[in-house]
Amino acid sequence: MAHFYQGASRPAEDVGYPVMSETRESSNEYDPHLEKGMLPEVEWKPSSKEYAVMATLAIISLMVALDATILVSVLPTLAVDLNGTATDAFWAGTSYLLTSAVCQPFIAALSDIFGRKELLLVSIFLFTLGTLLCAPVARTFTVFFVGRSIQGIGGGGIITLGQVIFADIVPLRQRPKFFALVQISWALGSVLGPLIGGLFVEHATWAWCFYINFPFCAIGLILVPIYVKLTTVKSSLVSKLARVDWIGGFLFIGGLTSFLVGISWGGVQYAWGSVQTIGPIIVGTAGVVLAIVWEIYGAREPFLRPSLFRSGSALATYVCALFQGFILFCALYYVPFYFTAVKFESPVQAGLDIFPATCVLLPSSIVTSLITTRMGRYRWAIWSGWVITAIGCGLLVLLDADTETAAWATILIVFGIGHGMLLTSLNIGIQAVSNVEDAGRAAAMYAFMRALGMSIGVAVGGSVFLNVMINELAELGLPESIAHNSEVYVEALSQMDPEDPVRIASLQAYVTGFQGVYWTITATAIASFFISLVIKRFSMDKGLQSDFTLEGGRAVKAPLMASSSSTMVPPANYSHPGSNGTHSSNYTQSAFGADSPYSSANASQVSQMGWQTRDNVAYDNTTGLARRDSIVAYYIQPGGRIVSVNLHPNARRSGEMGSTSDLGMQHFGAATNVDGRYDPSSESLLQEVRAGDQLGPYPAEYEAGITNVTPAWIPTR
């Protein structure tokens, strides 16, 4: 008899077993199932409950996206009103992005412990508090920076929890189509932010850039308690606090903050070789390294799961997400600045000028989402998106004082199409290459990497622009103070005679500075394309395996319990491709009882089954694991997809099998990394799973000493 229980699987290392996994990534064998897809598209449609959650997340995501970009066209006016410099204006944007990025992984981990709804409400509250400090309270840049930093923490929590909640309630195959609602809100807010900010500056005051947030905050604080009702296992506050990875969070957040501050100071506020720049970078790097070591070897419940990074495909996708955020925010900050500084357009007009990118980014993202859902494939969109983005970035280099409207509009259209494709494909790609149990954390890590790229992009973009412009000004015989006050100097420049040599030379310096930024993001896009070629094909046909369930929702859990009318067929017999040829394997039951340590980790539904050799049956109530010569435990999803394999050290490769007594190990013909470690993003595919097949029962002599085992059936497809 096989055992399905309402419990969670812990990584195989927790019980001291190395792991073998079978995928195309670990074998040179051609597997047609990876190309065709093991399972048919899941027929899942959201109920009104899911739609309500999606709408709520879309509304507050729009607010966060607006706030992240609304200051782009406001910075010159803001610097003047608060008696600041270009550096102060630079930090007005960077402080928000920095805190937004560094706190996201920790907030996602806290939501696993304290609840999705609770952390989402805290995030909205922090965003509201930060908004209050920025306007109407702020009268100096010091108060303004504090407000923006608090806003960033709240905004980062809203972004990452939106990703995590979608992974809780929507199956992966359908996720691109429905997450497009949030992507549209994010994209719409990102591109409309500069336009709305410009309108406020021209017709009201920059403070309205923050007043506009209050209605959204009120809506979020009302709707989240009503609709975002994700339930999980109850526990005491003391036990929850004990689970928090305080040491890892402190090291990571502190280290990354120090690193980003150093990067942001370099070449802008201090020289790159100065102690003020090098010191924070070194201290920050050491802090992040210590955090990683702690997460791997010391943390009881790491907030940075090592399992997220044990696949080359996952690492490549995370790097691509970081570079996409880097490129996007460099463009969002410096393309509108180009229109105000070189074309002498108003903030409103500069916001309107990026509309060509807006009008194609949204349709591009939506179409990509629909095609990805239909095909069940995502790599084509990642590769195509990077090629188009690289072309768009390269064309930006052509922008100068004489560029015609048709030319720059076409360039922005190309840029928008590429990024629209990447917004969807990278997000879904990282969840496809990850274990189904890590879907929420993987989505949160994607959001973090993109936000980290945004904060680095603004910092590096500002440094590149400033230093390239200073060099050009020096060659033209103009003071470098123009570059240090580039936003403020635009007003004086616009008042000069068009034939004034100083104006002409200054414009050339601005254009050269912008080109430095555009060359940087072009090189980044090209590098990202080649990195994306590492990403392998993984199936999108995965169910949900989360500790959190939406009340009244239509979750498709993985695995599903079979109906009581299922037919018992002991033992089940399957065939699958192997490097030693396709062969059959007989399955018997694995004894994981109700006392198993797996069942207390996070209460998600997992199936454990495995093969045993013929000797030494003994159920260990301490570990919850039946000890034998060799044991293999499988984590199963609907339809028989094996998402990870736990292999005992005594197990042998199929090529070494010599008799029927080795029945349990005949299966391992398809793998090349039998002795490898746990890889949750790897999958093994069975050729056939028959409806109603039961795994087991054991021969009578295997039942001795096994307790707390409940019969159940393999999920059908």
Image (tube, rainbow, N blue to C red):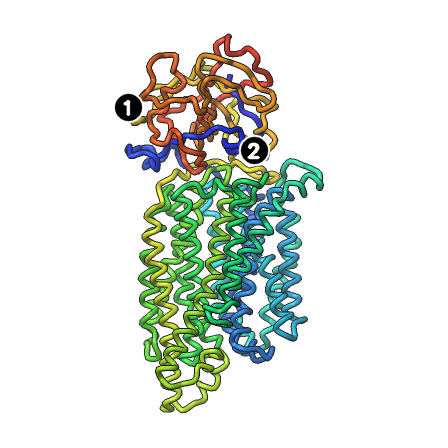
At 61% from the left and 64% from the top, the residue drawn is 213
**Above or below for 691 versus 280:** above
Q: Secondary structure at mark 1?
A: loop
Relative image position of residue 478 (x, y in whole percent) = 40, 85
Under mark 2, the amino acid is: Ser
Task: Answer with left or right where residue 99 lies relative to residue 583.
Answer: right
At 38% from the left and 51% from the top, the residue drawn is 368
Under mark 1, the amino acid is: Gly
Tell me which label, 1 or 2, sits earlier in the chain. 1
Residue identifier under label 1: 581
Residue identifier under label 2: 604
Relative image position of residue 411 (x, y in whole percent) = 34, 67
Relative image position of residue 461 (x, y in whole percent) = 43, 67
200 vs 644, nearest the viewer: 644
Q: Residues within 10 Å of mark 2 (few under 14, many from 20)?
A: many
**Residue 254, picture quadrant:** bottom right
